[in-house]
Amino acid sequence: MTRASHKISDQTRNWFFERDARAYSALSDFSTEAARRCGAGPDAEDLAQALLLDLTLKRDAGMLRLHSTAEFEGYLVISLRRRHISLWRRHGQRRAEGEVDSVASAVDAPDAALDRREHLELYVQIMHHALEQAGVVAATRSVVRRIFDRYVLCRDIESVLMESRLLGPDATSEQRVQERNNENRRQSRARATLTDALHELLRATEASTAMCWLNAGSRRIPFNTEDVRHALRLAMSLGRCEKAAHTAPKDEQ
Amino acid sequence: MTNTDQLRRQLGLGANEGLELAYELQLENSDVGLGFAATRSLWEELVDLPHWQELSLGAPVGLFAWEEQSGVYRLWLGAAGELRVLSGAWRQVDERVWHIDARQEEVTVRASLDSGDDLVLLLGRTECQFFRIASLVEVPALDSLTGDLHSETWLRAEYQLLAASPSVVDRVAAVGLTLRLWQPTSAETRRQLVRDTLVAESPLLQRVRQWAAGLSPALCGRCALATMEDAEALEDVLAAIDTVVEQGDEAVRRLATHIALERDRLESIVAVLAVRGDIPYEQGALDRLDEQASLLLSQLSSAGVEHPLLERAGEVEPFAWWGAVASP
């Protein structure tokens, strides 16, 4: 895959809105590559095709209002990230319901990397659970969510800040630096709170002989001491590879 | 108050006639004038003491409540048509004005207007409800819209719920929901459809367009109006989220889910109107709602909303707040 597929050109966007078939291969390449950067494995192409299907239907129905190429690109990237996360959420739900065998179906477009991601999702849930148990305030939990966006999903800090409305799209370079620094300080404090909460949860889990459960919306998911240790290790690693996380696409690291 | 089923029976509505609650209000219980009302007949008092408070129903029938005593109303027919009081105590004052006494029992009023509007007012001592009667549109089966391709279980359930609703607007929303959020579950079918839609319009869109073309302009006008009214009502619900915080996380989660699903339903109505080329004339109400929601985005996002419909909305409309609240 070439570097060109990391960007969408104005020409590609115009072709797409003009219903010119030349847009297809460029958008398909870009979306497949973007899905890979989100962490998708063999199902990256399917995620991209599903996105293109939605995109063409919305365009033809007059429901697609994207005013610039950057907005168009943002639409594709956020949509792909959500699709990828939905995929492993569904997988996690089936696992919690004891339907592990049914995961490898055509419906889910199984990803070879799902096992790893499935555990990752559990550890993220455990982190949320630990914060909840420790009674951590919502503001800190929001910062932790941004830490996951940044380090688990390898997203650029500025795009995460913009999505959270902590940084405006028109911010000057000085304001961007200032906000990045503020966010780094907030994330540093939140990481300390997170590891404290996980240490506390680990102690409670080690002391208990009963099965541990966490609530994920309407579901209850079992976990054990070993899972908490992994979650703690993951939490302590978040932020260590900051530079790598947002200066190069994942497949090039 | 009389429930909708009882009211449908009382009105003798057929299976293809919908009864939509358009507005309801609660009034204060007041008995200030009870003493002197007993000395003369109520109807005489009402002719002499016109202290009326106008109640805004957003209907072409004017409704006024007697300030002295709860359950006494004055009705004014402001448009050409016929007004009939179907049950309860009433007096006709002149050709266009009626006095209603709903202190002891509810009064049911039906107004059939020359404009085609068919309205029902249910007046109680401290409650008023205003309904619209509408011919229900026939909604196609989901499989006929999707060309017999498989649909996700959650979409099928949501579609059936909306398509069977006694509200015309909900039925329109069912089709809009499918247009916005349906995708074949098979990866191979998706690939094939992408190839097809490069050179031709999606078959789903063609079917929706054809169905939507059969909707009357009056019905589409009502859909646009209902979208505006529901958006305004949702804005009030959204403002209440701060007060619900005291009731705990679960209450906040339920409310946030309700708000997000309702907003998504409005988007489905707009989608059908957009396919017809009718731009909702009150898109401003939706914009205001979205603006208010964006201010509360972090609160809504941390409420723990989980719903497959909203997750899918988050994929298809990544900049929409109601999808974002259910997506990481």
Image (tube, coloured by chain):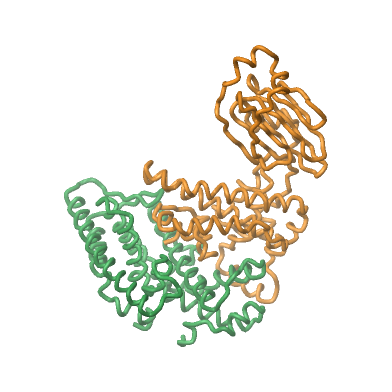
Q: Left of A45 or right of it: where is A62?
A: right
Q: Left of A217 or right of it: where is B68?
A: right
Colour green belongs to chain: A
Residue in front for this viewpoint, B313 or B298: B298
Q: Image point 54% across, 49% down: which residue?
A: B234
The percent coordinates of residue A239 (x first, y second) are: 27, 72
Q: Quadrant of the N terminus of chain B?
A: top right
In the rendered image of this protein, does residue B293 appear above or below residue B316?
Answer: above
Q: Left of B302 or right of it: where is B116?
A: right
Where on the picture, by quarter, is residue A117?
bottom left
Name the residue furthest front: B48
Q: Image point 57% across, 21% down: which residue?
A: B31
For the image, the number of numbered tags is 0
In the rendered image of this protein, does residue B4 appear above or below residue A199?
Answer: above
Colour orange belongs to chain: B
Q: Quadrant of the C terminus of chain B?
A: bottom left
Where on the picture, by quarter, is residue A112?
bottom left
Q: Image point 65% across, 44% down: which residue?
A: B164
The percent coordinates of residue A131 (x first, y second) are: 28, 55
Residue in front for this viewpoint, B101 or B65: B65
Name the residue furthest top: B39
Please say whether residue A102 is visible from this viewpoint: no
The percent coordinates of residue A237 (x first, y second) are: 25, 70
Please say whether residue A130 is visible from this viewpoint: yes
Residue in front for this viewpoint, B218 or A87: B218
Q: Image point 75% across, 36% down: which residue?
A: B14
In the rendered image of this protein, does residue A52 appear above or below residue B17?
Answer: below
